[in-house]
């Protein structure tokens, strides 16, 4: 398939620049997979789609303050975006500068601490953080929240709260699992009282999630890699839910990618892994029955993923409808509830 097959026109004013006043105040477009029927709803209608015994799976990753500014030894300015923390003193990062830093060179960040460029891996630089303080502590003190490139304002205190889910726990993401941003504690409690089961996985979302596909033929695209972890209790809940004929709903594409990656060789396996799975139309889903997700960028791998899940023609119609009805798009925007198309 061609990348152009996944393009659509989006007026810039529909890109949400700020979250709704309340987490649960978004709209929700419901897409029935086989019929393609679209229903305009509110996010607060979401519990009505859930039955006792159904399972919702969330991503409990926590966004780190991954953006840093500083100078090279030459005095040139640099912007560093941490992509992956390897250990307490080593990380992979994107580095923006007038000239790329050389291996072995040193950079002063936030006028507070030094890093050494120890290697390069494709477009990522390996940075060794000097001193005794851990990377996570340095980022928390000196870093800034890396809002998506289509959000035009710098991160505020409001963003620091609202660009995290209420259940964020495991540090490591540089982008939020945005489907989870709609949920607050009260709505989660409502779901539990209804008999809906809730479980978690961790997938540390990378900056690659915002990158468009730049090749004409999607089969030539090289997918970015992300780390994930699936607890044994989550794997057991999935097996039990399936055995009882109930539905497994992934809250976000990151959850879906983690679950489908862990089931690549048959039965879903608990544990840690690294995924570069690229889901496109024709993929046979093994775990997830329904997907709750935000609206995604044109020509993006995530738009291809939802097209694989609900049907490419269904998604084209849904996005055209969302534009016409002025839904709010992307990370701070409205949501969709997708049923899997059985004939994909």
Image (cartoon, rainbow, N blue to C red):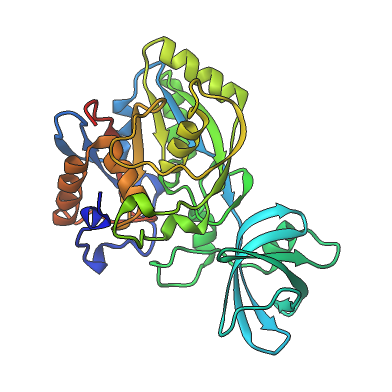
Q: Residue at x 53, y 49 (%)?
A: 225
| Side of 99 where 33 appears, left or right | left
Q: Where is residue 343, by image quadrant?
A: top left
Q: Position of residue 277 (x, y in %)?
A: 46, 42
Residue 288 in the image: above or below residue 21: above
Residue 162: x and y, percent? 48, 54
**Residue at figure coordinates x 43%, y 10% from the top left:** 243
| Quadrant in the picture for the C terminus | top left
Left or right of 175 in this view: 19: left
Q: Which of 77/106 is in front?
A: 106
Residue positioned 44% across, 21% down in the render: 193
Q: Closer to the camera, 296 or 272?
A: 272
Residue 293 position (above or below residue 34): below
Residue 303, image x, y percentages: 31, 49
Give the side of residue 216 with respect to residue 77, left or right.
left
163 w.r.t. 313: above or below: below
Residue 124: quarter of image: bottom right
Can you give x and y, in whole percent of width and height, for residue 87 in the image? Answer: 74, 52
Q: Residue furthest top?
A: 244
Identify which residue is drawn at 34% across, 24% down.
50
Of residue 316 and residue 113, the one placed in the foreground of this image is 316
């Amino acid at each position: 398939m061609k990348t152009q097959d996944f393009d659509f026109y989006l007026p810039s004013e529909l890109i949400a620049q700020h979250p709704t006043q309340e987490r649960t105040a978004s709209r929700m477009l419901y897409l029935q997979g086989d019929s393609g029927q679209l229903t305009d709803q509110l996010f607060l209608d979401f519990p009505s789609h859930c039955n006792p015994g159904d399972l919702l799976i969330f991503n409990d990753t926590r966004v780190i303050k991954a953006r840093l500014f500083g100078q090279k030894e030459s005095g040139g300015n640099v912007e560093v975006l941490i992509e992956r923390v390897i250990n307490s003193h080593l990380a992979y990062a994107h580095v923006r500068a007038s000239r790329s830093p050389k291996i072995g060179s040193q950079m002063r960040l936030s006028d507070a601490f030094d890093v050494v460029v120890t290697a390069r891996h494709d477009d990522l630089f390996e940075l060794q953080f000097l001193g005794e303080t851990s990377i996570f502590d340095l980022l928390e003190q000196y870093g800034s929240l890396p809002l998506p490139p289509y959000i035009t304002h710098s991160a505020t205190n409001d963003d620091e709260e609202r660009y995290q889910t209420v259940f964020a726990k495991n540090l490591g993401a540089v982008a939020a699992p945005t489907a989870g941003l709609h949920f607050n504690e009260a709505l989660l409690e409502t779901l539990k009282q209804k008999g809906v089961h809730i479980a978690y996985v961790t997938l540390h979302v990378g900056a690659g999630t915002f990158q468009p596909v730049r090749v004409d033929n999607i089969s030539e695209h090289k997918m970015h890699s992300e780390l994930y972890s699936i607890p044994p209790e989550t794997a057991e809940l999935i097996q039990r839910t399936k055995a009882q004929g109930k539905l497994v709903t992934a809250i976000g594409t990151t959850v879906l990618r983690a679950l489908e990656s862990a089931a690549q060789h048959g039965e879903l396996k608990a544990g840690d892994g690294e995924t570069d799975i690229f889901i496109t139309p024709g993929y046979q889903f093994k775990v997830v029955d329904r997907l709750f997700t935000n609206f995604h960028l044109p020509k993006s791998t995530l738009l291809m993923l939802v097209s694989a899940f609900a049907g490419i023609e269904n998604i084209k119609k849904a996005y055209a409808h969302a534009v016409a009805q002025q839904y709010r798009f992307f990370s701070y925007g409205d949501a969709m509830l997708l049923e899997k198309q059985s004939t994909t």
